[in-house]
Image (cartoon, helix red, strand yellow):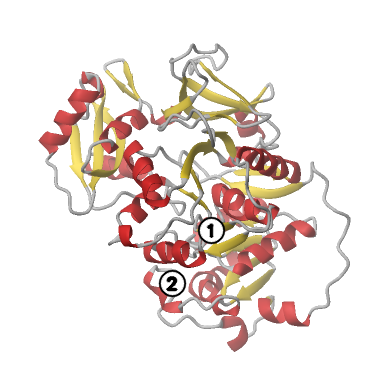
Amino acid sequence: MAIQLPNIPQTVIAYYATLSLGAQVVMTNPLYTPRELEHQWSDAGCRVAVVTDFLYADRIRAARARLPIEHYIITSIPDYMRYPLKFFARRKLAHADPPRVARVAPEPGVHDFLKLVKETKPAPLPAAPRPDDLAVLQYTGGTTGVSKGAMLTHGNLSANLQQSRAWFTGLEEGKEVFLTALPLFHAFGMTAAMNFPVSIRGTMVLIPDPRDVKAIVRAVATHRVTMLPAVPAIFNAILNYPKIGDIDLQSVKRCFSGSAAMAEDVLRRFEELTGSRIVEGFGLSEASPVTHMNPLNGLRKPGTIGVPIPDTDSRTVSVDDGVTETGSGEPGELIIRGPQVMRGYWNMPDESALALRDGWLYTGDLAVIDADGFHRIVGRKKEMIVVSGYKVFPDEVDGVLMSHPAVLEAATIGLPDPKRGELVKSFVVLKPGYQATVAEVLAFCRENLAAYKVPRVVEFRGELPKSGALKILRRKLVEEELAKNPA
């Protein structure tokens, strides 16, 4: 069952209905083009898809012959929530006046979601799925190649919920209010913003577009949100919302930040604004996704991903042989072992064998573990930059850049260089109302980085390319630069 919906009630309904039947879910980005849909749905073997009426009309109907779907269940956003349709038009999710396809022009194999709910008599559910049964094919973002379907079982998802609940102690069952702004098609949103609240009978406040800062701020204040899972870009955006200091966000008790490193200044200011505690963590689609978190109470280290969560082992190994364990403070590839780790990649035995070795998941992320066991991500294995034989980790450079008082976001990449092998280039977005020059930024880097790590080039931008889950896409920046100067 493919579910290609923004964060609306029908997404949650379809997700749990599918799992209850013992079928498998493929959460699909609503922004995918027909080409991307063809790859994902054909690879997964999807036979049923739940989509919005305007997505069906705008993208799917013309491509039906190329897609494997036999039955489309069409829903309209106003069916369960009165969200203005013009909102979606502004964000390129719909036409300005999106048609209600299923109700206006029924077609073979096309069914109306609301009509099915109203007119279909519920049948007895089959036997409950077993822990080892496949629940979700969670497709990776494809940032380093073709998108792969991580096979997550019911046991994987259940274990990750139990691990997360054990970490976030003191929650009141039936009383917590979660902000569900993270896209539910992403593993982080699926677990932290949907499965988690459902597991404790919490309330979900659904935000269809994570970029709509006004809707997010209004939702937190109006619905008295207590739990706020988000990415640094969202925390940053809230802090920079006009007159944010005049808005009461004191209901927020706990926040979970992942997907990218958070600047310590952002963490401190957000906690002062709300009175909450931000827990920085780490995860990946292949692990359902959470593997590490900073402690909720006691010692924590901003800028790190914390320590492994219960029943999870992790270590760092040499990027050369993948076996030799690296020492304290020495970068290595992060490998993980635990009950939340996927079964493997769907229909990709070779890729599965590379990722899963001797019971360990090789993440492709480079990390450093300090003497206290706290982990810090320094970059992706495939994004590591080699300058005159020296290794430069993009996350480290970005961390320094984002500690500059005028910098909102940063992304560092490596580009071919005939003399050094690669050169370091950084893209910087300034905070609204702030100014800085390239010379000032470079001077700041020289004070905080070894000479070979200092960017050779700094470019200011209004925004950085991001995925649907608001993760900065360095590969897009690399592609753009290489297109300017092809080898």
User: What's the CA distance linking mark 1 and mark 2?
Assistant: 17 Å
Disc 1 target residue: 180
Q: Residue furthest bottom?
A: 104
Q: How many marks?
A: 2
Tell me where residue 104 appears, x and y as whole percent: 58, 88
Residue at 52% across, 56% down: 183
Please give left or right for residue 115 compared with residue 354 in the image.
right
Q: Does the image show residue 412?
A: yes
Residue at 55% across, 79% down: 78
Q: Residues within 10 Å of mark 2 (few under 14, many from 20)?
A: many
Q: Amino acid at mark 2?
A: Phe
Q: Secondary structure at mark 1?
A: strand
Tell me where residue 205 appears, x and y as whole percent: 54, 64
Disc 2 target residue: 88
Q: Does the image show residue 105?
A: no
Kindly indicate the quadrant of the structure image that contains residue 109. Answer: bottom right
Residue nearer the viewer, 215 or 186: 215
Q: Amino acid at mark 1?
A: Thr
Tell me where residue 95 appears, x and y as whole percent: 42, 77
Q: Residues within 10 Å of mark 1 (few under 14, many from 20)?
A: many
Kindly indicate the quadrant of the structure image that contains residue 408. Answer: top left
Q: Where, quadrant-wise, is the C terminus in this rendering?
A: top left
In this view, the mark in front (1 or 2): 1
Q: Where, quadrant-wise, is the N terminus in this rendering?
A: bottom right
Residue nearer the viewer, 379 or 182: 182
Q: Secondary structure at mark 2?
A: helix
Q: Earlier in the sequence, mark 1 or mark 2?
A: 2
